[in-house]
Amino acid sequence: MAIYLDCNATTPVEPSVASVVMRFLEKDFGNAASPIHDYGVFALAAVEHARGQVAEVVKARRDEVIFTSGATESNNLALLGLAEAGIRSGRRHLITTAIEHKAVLEPFDEMARLGFEVQILPVQADGRFDPQRLADSLRPDTLLVSTMQVNNETGVLQPLTEVANIVSNHDTWWHVDAAQGFGKELEQLRHPRIDFISISGHKIYGPKGIGALIARKHDRQFPPLRPLMFGGGQEQALRPGTLPVPLIAGLGEAAKLAVRNNGERIEKCRTFREKALATFSSLGAEQNGTEEYTLPHVLNISLPGINSELAIKALKNVIAVSSTSACTSHTRTPSHVLAAMGLSSDQVEQSIRLSWCHMTPEVDWSEVETIFRVLRG
């Protein structure tokens, strides 16, 4: 079977995470909302333990973690959840960037339909937005700024530290879509000025179907979010429904390992990256996104003269790679991220994304090189 190099789409599950999930599926299967017997008590304890493990990654408070089904739901809750506050206060200006995931851009489309003014900042050729453009765009009526931590297609780390300094003297809410960087790049998300952080379990070697919105309190008060669903009052009355204890416990275990093993994982990914870069450099590949800012587990390249769809099919028995975001790959639409970076239509159509992790086995790079040379004739 081909070696999996599409970890930005979803990651393999850590063995200890799988064990935790199975334990709460098969043995400790109580409902956390029923702590009237030992089953429920233990389930509730597991949920709160996991809540603390997730909070620790970004140095948040335990009660600032709201469990959701994943970053898409978290993004929607953070963005659409502020609509009423914006309408009530008259603050209807929103800022985001051209390289955000559709799980941010589409909720902003809905906010625009509700009468909000959405300003989309351009990005530079290096794959990052210009913090100065953000500073120049802030207005007294700016309700919300939403910026991703790491781009899902290029792996480029965005300038969150600079943004924190810019918004430090402004009362705008600041949301960060951290689906691709949570547990991988630790320091930036720990800045207390970030109000909302969206995460997904299946991007950090945890189970699918679980994530969280971290909503930092101000003066012991939650941000003025309104729920998107109603019925039950769970999760600070912001996300009703029976808590999926096995998935939550698995996310907690994954979060714990992300902090504990962060350095070791980075080194393994860097070693793998060196070999991948050497191979594609010999083929004349052009890297999309500046190396200086790219995390060590992602590589987005364009191979002149080779269509990405053809390349992916030719490689399918050796390495499994992708050409765009997993959530939009079925649409066959060109990457809005690469287009925003100024790549030509040919470069976009010739781009592939490789993403790996600390559990990825060795690749026969000579075989990969041979396949591409054959494709070029």
Image (cartoon, rainbow, N blue to C red):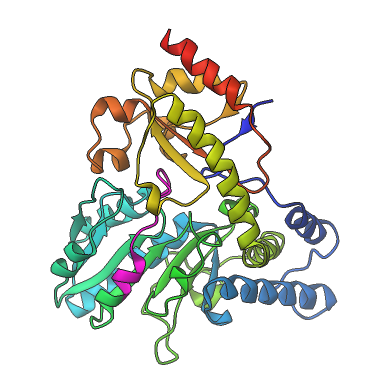
Choose between 163 and 214: the one closer to the eye. 163
User: Considering the image in quadrants, where does the N terminus appear?
Assistant: top right
Residue 135, horizontal then vertical, whole percent: 18, 69
**Observer-nearest of 211 and 274:** 274
Residues 247 and 320: in front is: 320
User: How many marks do you count on the picture?
Assistant: 0
The answer to whether residue 18 is above or below residue 331 is: below
The stretch of residues the image draws in magenta is: 151-164
> Going by the image, does 6 lie left or right of 139?
right
Q: Is residue 161 magenta?
A: yes
Horizontally, is 347 left or right of 11 in the view?
A: left
Magenta span dominant secondary structure: loop
Q: Position of residue 307 (x, y in %)?
A: 38, 20
293 lies left or right of 320? left
Q: Quadrant of the C terminus?
A: top left
Q: Quadrant of residue 282 in the image?
A: top left
